Image: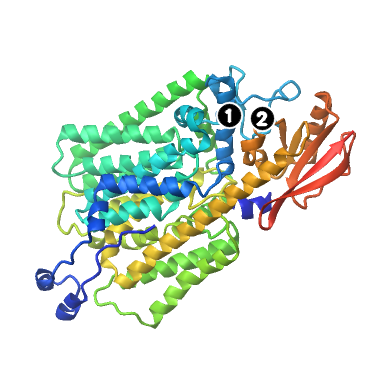
Amino acid sequence: MEVVGSRLQQVTITDAPDRDTSRESAQGAPDAPGAARSAQPRPVPAWRRVLGKPAVATLALLALYVGLSFANSPEGYLGTDTGGKVVTLQAIETRGSVGHLDVGYWAESWDPAGDLHGYWGTLQNDDGAWVQVTTVPLMLAASPLWDAGGYRLTLVLPMLGGALCALAARSLTRRLSGDEAAQELAFWATGLAGPVLLYALDLWEHTLGLAAMAWACVLLAAAAEGETTARRVVTFAAGAGLLWGVAFSMRTEALLYGAFVTAAVCLWLATRRRIGGALLVGAASAVGVAVGVVGNSMLERAVLGGTLRAGRASGTAGGFGTQPGTRLREGLITTFGLDAGTTGVVLGVVAVLALGLLVRRAAKPGWKVDRPDVTLGALAVVPVVLGFMSGLAFIPGMLIASPLAVAGLVLGLGGRAADGGATNDRSRLPARVLALAAVAALPAVWAFQYVGGAGPQWGGRYVLLSAFLLTVVGALRLASVDIVVRRIVVAAAVLVTAFGFTWMVVRTNGFASAGHELAAIDEPVLIAKDSAGFLPREFVAENGDRRWLATLGNAELERAVDIVGQAGFRRFGLVVIAGSDTPDHVGGMHRVDTTRIEIVSGASIDVVRYER
């Protein structure tokens, strides 16, 4: 599975207005008041005025999502979790009803505990249904779309989630500052030049969960505004809490982020001697969270016969404090990693530090490029280029996949510079409060996130809200940076995202082609043997209704072969990563031949046929 982990699982941004150099020469600083009065505003192109309207921009973004989605195959996915959702939708379609989201288990008679269930992570509820997916709202919304137009039509949901993320970025920027250019940059950077783009093109709940968390942040910022009445504070805070609860139905880390962001807002209100407001925000948010969590639990009980999301959360909480070294390593991977290896993390740290220092230097008035800046630029670019040259693959690091977040991190944690140009406007929530919450939450998310999945993801899928908040702050403050470095940051965001999209196109089409070849191999049972048990979920588009068993080692393989015999079959196919050791004889059956199927360049699977 290491090969799969490293190789297989492993856009135009509206820029802020250029700095007026005539102001610098006349006054010696870009923000000199006299120069600001004499500077002539540059005419805004008509196309930009049109795209500046939120409704038009949203429609344009959705149209881009739809167009880009056709480069991907509907029979291949960004990750194995999507395969679990697809096989669930297939089962619903075959059965003609939701039916507890039951995917069934052909070998239940011989393996009642489901230890070798072909789709890793499938659980049996109290009613005997085998449940692969715990995100009930997404499945209920996707089912009629699947019936009407298959996988491609279900992508409407993550695409809408992506658009809502971009709109939340724009709205949050408006709450923090009235800068129109910053609002536009936040919208396009979030929607097109970061992880949201990739997750918007795959049937995963990430964009919808992130959108709920992002709008919760918008409502908390609204609740913190000085002119807000007590009634509106309660309304906004309760709405934010409800959204945190809704997000929890899709993203387990939502409650952690909700706690950190809400606490940060309440503490800021307290420092402003608005103790009553802080208490109202905290209490109303808690009530909203409770309503959201209880509502999702009731929905799960109605559909699944139990509360699997709550069980998953308690399991995640139970893992807190275990494997601290592994959790720290995976936290660094999902924050800085160019890949899941130690070298990838080190190179990522170098690139992030260099870019951060360059942005910080370029934010100083009168900055001119000199030798240290060239060195920093090289140190920021070369590690990423080296990563690109190693081949298409996942980039798991949040700060690598979201360069604007690096700018937000550097510029968002310091005094007045972090306030988005709001100067002395004490009624607005400072951007640095959200930047601090985004950073402070990271160790907590690292401590609770699923262990073993750090490498095969794009841009830190467990820390997407941190990336979102820091990107918003980066968009807010990027106008204070020299135009040359500003363009470097935006270009880096576009290029890294384009690299990720290219990888997604190659990956989805590669797995679709391999799945088609696998479907042509006529074996009554397929046994997958790898180090994680994920392989069957990659091939469900054309192989979802086949008899699968998933094994993690030789002992489980022996047991699986025994089940094949008990079921009355005299042959089976063993699916392994190409080049893996396979026995000549197992369970009274002998190897007949091997078929190799290429997925992407440098990564293949072997299907080894056995018969009695």
Q: Along the line of sight, which residue is nearer the eye, 511 or 436? A: 511
Image position, residue 537 (x, y; %): 63, 38
Q: Is residue 454 left or right of residue 357?
A: right
Give the quadrant of residue 220: top left
Q: How is the image coloured?
A: rainbow
Q: Along the line of sight, which residue is nearer the eye, 277 or 72? A: 72
Q: Please state which amino acid type lies under the numbered disc 2.
A: Asp
Number of callouts in the render?
Answer: 2
Image position, residue 63 (x, y; %): 38, 46
Image position, residue 600 (x, y; %): 65, 54
Question: What SS does tag 2 mark?
Answer: loop
Question: What SS does tag 1 mark?
Answer: helix
Residue 9 visible here: no
Q: Give me the disc on residue 545.
A: 2
Question: Which label's residue is closer to the chain start, 2 or 1?
Answer: 1
Q: Please state which amino acid type lies under the numbered disc 1.
A: Gln
Q: CA distance from mark 2 to mark 1?
A: 8 Å
For the C terminus, the quadrant is top right
Q: Give me the disc on residue 90.
A: 1
Q: Is residue 456 left or right of residue 40?
A: right
Residue drawn at (72%, 30%) of the image? 547
Q: Give me the disc on residue 260.
A: none
Asked whether disc 2 touches disc 1, contact meaning CB atoms under 8 Å apart, the reply is: yes
Q: Along the line of sight, which residue is nearer the eye, 119 or 60? A: 60
